[in-house]
Image: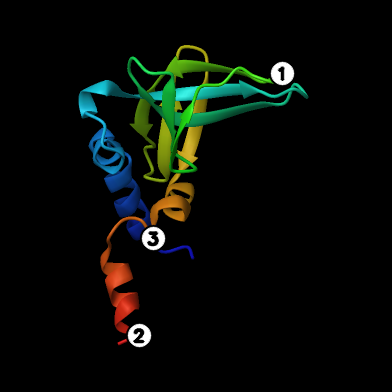
Amino acid sequence: MHRDKKELAALAARVMDLKFFSGRFGIPVKKLQWGIIISMNEDCTESISPAVFIEGENLFIDILNDHILPICNICGCKSTVEVAECLPLEVGEGYHFVSENEEVVLPNTEIYRVYHYKVYSDFLAKEARKYE
């Protein structure tokens, strides 16, 4: 499934733009901002994930699962949110989310894994021609 670095970087650059998420989920871009979700489950296991927050709502876009979800604090689970900057890594390998207290790296390979069949590309068109 992994393509060359150039293809991975090109797809990631298209996806990692608030305009992409605005169009994908029908939310005005002015209501979106990059963020980090810190979740602690009932077993005290912490996870840190990149996200897109929807201003004025108790909702976020889970980038790695391509869903809109509520920010939940139920059944022993606690979630906190932090506004973050989304910065491309210098070597073009992914994106670095940095907030006041946390940071997380989102590799291009993960972006590709989630979105490569959800965004038009020359590769998909070329692959489809094999079935004509």
* Image point (24%, 41%), residue name: 23
Label whose residue precedes the other's in the sequence (2 or 3): 3
Residue that extends furthest to the top in the rendered view of this protein? 100
What amino acid type should be assigned to the residue bearing mark 1? Gly
Which of the numbered marks, if any, corresponds to residue 88? Answer: none
* Image point (38%, 55%), residue name: 8
Tag 3 residue? 117
The answer to whether mark 2 and mark 3 are in CB contact below 8 A is: no
Which quadrant is home to the C terminus?
A: bottom left
Tag 2 residue? 131
- Which of the pair 65/49 is nearer the observer? 65
Label whose residue precedes the other's in the sequence (1 or 2): 1
Which of the numbered marks, if any, corresponds to residue 76? Answer: 1
Residue that extends furthest to the right in the rendered view of this protein? 43
Spot occupied by residue 33 in the image (x, y as percentages of width and height): 32, 23
Q: State the CA–CA distance, disc 1 to disc 3.
A: 35 Å
Spot occupied by residue 78 in the image (x, y as percentages of width and height): 63, 17
Label whose residue precedes the other's in the sequence (1 or 3): 1
Spot occupied by residue 13 in the image (x, y as percentages of width and height): 29, 45
Near mark 3 (Cα within 10 A), the count class, few <14, some 14-19 or many ≥20, is few
